[in-house]
């Protein structure tokens, strides 16, 4: 700053009234910064300055967020801090779950806490028929519309456990239920009832749920009405071949069990017939989290097919922290390390032998009951992995059919049947905008293959949003949002002055990345025929047609006596621009008025004000005539004066004691211009 101050020096002033003389108070951030009204830091470094005590009286207070948000309000973590802000600059606050409305932010006292209003509890009604698994005592939640906080009397039905909870997502809507989980699927004896229970699947003795004549059971399994889960050897509706594709504990424990001692996903449930086939089970995500923390050591002799570099897995380590392992020569895959039980010996899996295939009747490696896959022509020549050419006898082949959303086809399209292990590794993948590993499962020979493993990418909105966009996406896990969900909620829209063509698009190419926004185009408008006194239109071709605001701004400027910058608002496409931004200059009286002018009201016009307000008290001095005018050419400067001219008179001689040479005092001149007079010395006059 030209005055020699810096932000460190100015920052010591805690309020606006002490922040003068080489400093300026930034009302937007409630901080004192280096600068002067006409200095280099004016304007750009802060959108709202205060330079004088008078300015300070006009500065609204700045506040900070409270320690905890009040009931009904949610802060996203970005947009309102840290530090003090004006209420108009506090963003990122929205109505919490079960509340709705438009958030209003207020700041009542300088450096106090923001207060919020506008969010009210949404009211919903119970559905006419409660979801399976829930009961209502008959009172406590109605009748009619009530808020979530006033809804009681709900509980989990028999054969379900947990805590019944409701959410109200829309005003005058219907409550959504959650919290109750089924204990056993066996009591549900019809296909329709069974498939309405989350966690249960219907098993028909023939080709699915075709009729009540089928010998049928309801078991733990996937929920699907298009193709109900078919019966198989496992009582809970799963087979080992259905569970094996899940290669991590957390992915396995929905309907299957994770055998920690072999790092394998197997059919079973905690009380089912297969629960004793493994020495160390994990049945829930909590069990998996506990397994992640277990430690173990490498075996003294590595299993066939594995190699160790000698470092990276020394001593007692967790499976996740054990490195330096790879598949040995003639083996391929990715090494997985499992520690169970704790302080035991690590279990290694993931490496398969590479088989050289020379004929249609090649032999698969012994052990594990592996047999060749069909058709055998897939392995007639060249090299292929054990996964490509050999399978467990329990595997089945299926037809592909239609692919679910998020999955793309590869080699397993157009003919069949195919084996899931082939299609899962070669034939299918995740579509653009999705992430994960495509998993193919065959419920029975000749059936339609099931697919899973691909989830829609989730991203965050760019900060700040690009020009033309406004709004937010409700964050999910890890603060990320799915583009399809955000699009359905329509919480991101085109900003004022932009239109949707054809609509707002959010694409998330990389999971955990930033959304790419599209679909908002700047409106085009015509300039009004009369720009008013505040604006001037120069060259640049912004007339005679509709233009965007960006195209026209270069040709638009503020008229003399006004300051900007000018702005254009095009609210409706092909409408008329509204002109904004140019305001009348403010000046103050100079320390001394020019000759011929005086201020009839002493003390007036000392503070900054418009020219019209100051002109009332300005008059022509004695000896001057005219209509005084006041103008303010430079915002923040001093007034310019015009309109007062010196009076002109004629000289009537002779007058006793005076002489005139008539040359220096014309017949009509101002008093200053009449220089040809002298005293009549000869007749004893002097002066």
Image (cartoon, rainbow, N blue to C red):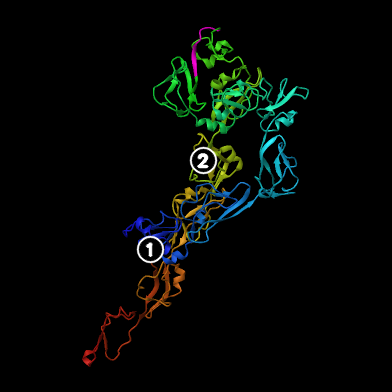
Percent across and percent down for residue 185 are: 70, 30
Find disc 1 in the rendering and name its residue. Answer: 20
Q: Secondary structure at mark 2?
A: loop
Q: Quarter of the image containing the C terminus?
A: bottom left
Residue furthest out toward the right: 213
Q: Quadrant of residue 225?
A: top right
Percent across and percent down for residue 437 are: 54, 27
Q: Quadrant of residue 391?
A: top right
Characterize the local packing of mark 1: few (<14), some (14-19) or many (20 or more) Cα atoms within 10 angstroms.
many
Q: Quarter of the image containing the N terminus?
A: bottom left
Residue furthest out toward the bottom: 683
Residue 55 in sight here: yes
Mark closer to the chain start, 2 or 1: 1
Q: Nearer the viewer, residue 37 or 404?
A: 404
Magenta stretch: dominant secondary structure: strand
Q: Is residue 652 left or right of residue 288?
A: left
Q: Secondary structure at mark 1?
A: loop
Magenta stretch: includes residue 88: no
Q: Nearer the viewer, residue 654 or 433?
A: 433
| Span shown in magenta | 351-360
Q: Quadrant of residue 297?
A: top left
Magenta stretch: includes residue 353: yes
Residue visible at 56% across and 34% down in the picture: 286
Residue visible at 33% across and 86% down in the picture: 652
Find disc 2 in the rendering and name its residue. Answer: 460
Task: Give me the disc on residue 364.
Answer: none
């Amino acid at each position: 700053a030209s005055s020699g101050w810096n932000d460190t020096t100015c920052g010591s002033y805690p309020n606006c009234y002490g922040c003068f003389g080489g400093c300026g108070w930034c009302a937007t951030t409630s901080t004192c910064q280096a600068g002067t009204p006409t200095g280099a830091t004016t304007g750009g470094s802060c959108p709202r300055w205060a330079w004088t005590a008078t300015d300070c009286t006009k500065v609204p207070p700045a506040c900070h967020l409270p320690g905890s948000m009040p009931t009904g309000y949610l802060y996203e973590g970005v947009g309102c801090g840290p530090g003090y802000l004006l209420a108009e600059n506090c963003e990122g606050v929205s109505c919490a779950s079960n509340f709705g409305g438009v958030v209003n932010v207020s700041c009542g006292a300088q450096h106090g806490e923001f207060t919020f209003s506008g969010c009210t509890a949404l009211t919903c009604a119970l559905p006419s028929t409660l979801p399976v698994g829930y009961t209502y005592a008959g009172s406590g939640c109605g009748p009619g519309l009530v808020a979530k906080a006033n809804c009681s009397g709900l509980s989990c039905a028999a054969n379900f456990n947990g805590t019944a909870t409701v959410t109200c997502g829309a005003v005058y809507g219907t409550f959504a239920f959650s919290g109750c989980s089924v204990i056993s699927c066996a009591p549900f004896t019809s296909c329709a009832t069974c498939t309405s229970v989350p966690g249960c699947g219907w098993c028909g003795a023939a080709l699915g749920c075709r009729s009540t004549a089928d010998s049928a059971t309801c078991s733990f399994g996937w929920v699907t009405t298009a193709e109900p889960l078919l019966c198989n050897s496992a009582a809970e509706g799963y087979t080992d071949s259905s569970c094996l594709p899940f290669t991590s504990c957390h992915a396995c424990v929905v309907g299957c069990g994770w055998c920690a001692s072999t790092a394998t996903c197997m059919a079973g449930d905690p009380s089912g017939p297969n629960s004793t086939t493994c020495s160390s089970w994990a049945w829930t995500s909590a069990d998996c989290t506990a397994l992640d923390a277990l430690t173990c050591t490498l075996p003294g002799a590595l299993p066939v097919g594995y190699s160790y570099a000698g470092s990276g897995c020394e001593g007692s380590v967790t499976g996740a922290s054990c490195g330096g392992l790879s598949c040995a020569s003639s083996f391929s895959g990715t090494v997985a390390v499992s520690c169970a039980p704790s302080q035991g010996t690590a279990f290694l899996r993931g490496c398969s032998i590479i088989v050289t295939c020379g004929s249609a009747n090649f032999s698969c490696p012994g052990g594990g009951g592996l047999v060749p896959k069909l058709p055998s022509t897939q392995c007639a020549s060249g090299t292929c992995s054990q996964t490509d050419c050999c399978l467990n006898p329990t595997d089945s082949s299926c037809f592909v059919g239609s692919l679910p959303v998020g999955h793309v086809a590869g080699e397993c399209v157009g003919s069949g049947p195919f084996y899931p292990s082939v299609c899962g590794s070669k034939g299918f993948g995740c579509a653009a905008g999705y992430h994960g590993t495509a998993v193919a499962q065959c419920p029975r020979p000749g059936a339609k293959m099931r697919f899973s493993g691909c989830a829609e990418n989730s991203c965050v909105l760019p900060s700040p949003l690009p020009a033309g966009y406004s709004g937010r996406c409700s964050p999910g896990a890890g603060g990320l949002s799915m583009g399809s969900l955000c699009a359905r909620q329509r919480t991101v829209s085109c900003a004022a002055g932009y239109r949707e063509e054809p609509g707002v698009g959010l694409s998330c190419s990389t999971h955990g990345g930033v959304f790419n926004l599209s679909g908002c185009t700047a409106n085009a408008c015509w300039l009004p025929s009369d720009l008013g006194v505040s604006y001037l239109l120069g060259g640049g071709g912004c007339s005679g047609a509709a233009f965007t605001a960006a195209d026209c701004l270069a040709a638009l400027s503020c008229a003399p006596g006004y300051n900007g910058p000018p702005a254009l608002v095009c609210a409706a496409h092909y409408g008329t621009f509204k002109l904004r931004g140019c305001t009348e200059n403010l000046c103050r009286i100079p320390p001394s008025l020019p000759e011929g002018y005086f201020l009839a009201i002493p003390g007036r016009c000392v503070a900054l004000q418009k020219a019209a307000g100051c002109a009332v008290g300005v008059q022509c001095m004695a000896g001057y005539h005219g209509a005084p005018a006041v103008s303010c050419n430079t915002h923040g400067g001093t007034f310019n004066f015009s309109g007062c001219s010196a009076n002109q008179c004629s000289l009537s001689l002779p007058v006793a004691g005076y002489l005139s040479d008539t040359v220096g005092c014309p017949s009509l001149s101002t008093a200053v211009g009449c220089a040809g007079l002298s005293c009549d010395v000869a007749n004893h006059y002097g002066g």
